């Protein structure tokens, strides 16, 4: 999603430092929140997991949620801080960015994703779940909060509740292709890539020690001075992922599991150490 927004920036259709409500009207983000704030989680917007959110997912598992319904859970919640003065990861930011992509292009975000990234790169395993059909995923018992549900639990409300903040399905091979294309300048300009990899002051993500840019986390493994890896983690009921890419060697490290309680940090470091001869 960040790459799609930066493509629109490259085309002069979006200004990173303009108020996000310039582009998103239903509903508009709060005044003072810029497109950059949404991309790097410096908006101060609270997460969508407010009272009633899990109950809605569990109570109507077969019913999809719209972006407007997702954002309604945060409508009356005070901001965590003034825009641009702090950092806090929030899916709310990327729900707004999905609406921005749709409003600017006039197309469903799944179509934009397919025509601009998936088809040009030949990503056969990649799609936006809840909006498209694709190769089936491995299913395991689904854990929501403290409750565990059987593997055949309806997934519609879960996946649509994440939408453009976490409903992407992909594979290790497709992720490798995507990251190589990104860092080769095939998807966005080098200046936009520079923006994407510029770390927000005070940001700290849940992956290995890292800071957050515009949709990418950065990791400098202490065991390998000078190494810079870029990637992101993903967590949704029933699935956990972590990916980091080495743009110098063109290597993508990827881990996936079916339990959100897993800790991939030791696994990721072990993979990096193995590939780099330690």
Image (cartoon, rainbow, N blue to C red):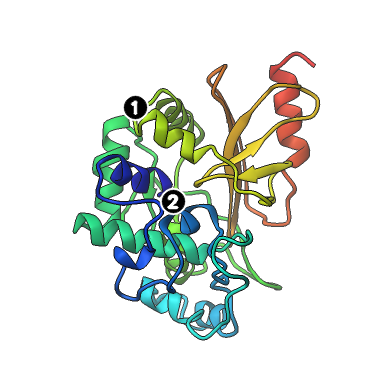
Task: Give the vertical position of 128 relative to 60 (above or below).
Answer: above
The residue drawn where x is 69% and y is 50% is 204
Q: Which mark is residue 171?
A: none
In the image, residue 18 lies at what x, y percent?
Answer: 37, 58
- Displayed quadrant of residue 198: top right
Q: Residue furthest top?
A: 277
Task: Give the vertical position of 116 relative to 240 (above or below).
Answer: above
Going by the image, does 110 lie left or right of 153? left
| Crowd class of label 2 (few under 14; some 14 to 19; many from 20; radius 10 Å) | some
Closest to the observer: 193 or 31?
31
Going by the image, does 213 lie left or right of 116? right
In the image, residue 153 lies at what x, y percent?
Answer: 52, 68
- Displayed quadrant of residue 199: top right
For label 1, the residue is 186
In the structure shown, which secondary structural element does the residue marked by tag 2 occupy? Answer: strand
In the image, residue 86 lies at what x, y percent?
Answer: 64, 61
The residue drawn where x is 60% and y is 48% is 200
The residue drawn where x is 53% and y is 52% is 40
Task: Give the vertical position of 219 relative to 103 (above or below).
Answer: above
Task: Give the vertical position of 14 relative to 249 (above or below).
Answer: below
For label 2, the residue is 168
Going by the image, does 202 lie left or right of 249? right
First in sequence: mark 1 vs mark 2: 2
């Amino acid at each position: 999603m960040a790459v799609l927004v930066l493509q629109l920036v490259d085309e002069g259709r979006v200004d990173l430092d303009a108020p996000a409500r310039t582009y998103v009207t239903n509903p508009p983000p709060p005044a003072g929140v810029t497109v950059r704030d949404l991309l790097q989680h410096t908006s101060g917007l609270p997460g969508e997991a407010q009272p009633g959110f899990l109950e809605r997912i569990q109570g109507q598992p077969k019913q999809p949620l719209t972006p407007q319904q997702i954002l309604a859970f945060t409508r009356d919640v005070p901001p965590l801080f003034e825009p641009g003065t702090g950092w806090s990861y929030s899916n709310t930011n990327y729900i707004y960015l999905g609406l921005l992509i749709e409003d600017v292009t006039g197309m469903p975000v799944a179509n934009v994703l397919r025509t601009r990234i998936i088809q040009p790169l030949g990503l056969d395993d990649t799609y936006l779940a809840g909006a498209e059909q694709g190769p089936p995923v491995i299913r395991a018992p689904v854990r929501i909060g403290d409750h565990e549900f059987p593997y055949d639990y309806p997934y519609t409300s879960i996946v649509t509740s994440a939408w453009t903040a976490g409903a992407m399905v992909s594979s290790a091979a497709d992720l490798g292709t995507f990251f190589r294309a990104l860092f080769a300048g095939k998807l966005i300009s080098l200046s936009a890539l520079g923006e994407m990899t510029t770390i927000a002051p005070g940001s700290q993500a849940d992956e290995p020690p890292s800071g957050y840019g515009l949709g990418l986390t950065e990791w400098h493994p202490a065991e390998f001075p000078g190494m810079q890896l870029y990637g992101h983690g993903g967590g949704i009921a029933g699935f956990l992922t972590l990916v980091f890419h080495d743009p110098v060697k063109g290597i993508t490290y990827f881990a996936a599991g079916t339990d959100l309680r897993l800790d991939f940090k030791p696994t990721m470091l072990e993979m990096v150490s193995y590939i780099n001869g330690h």
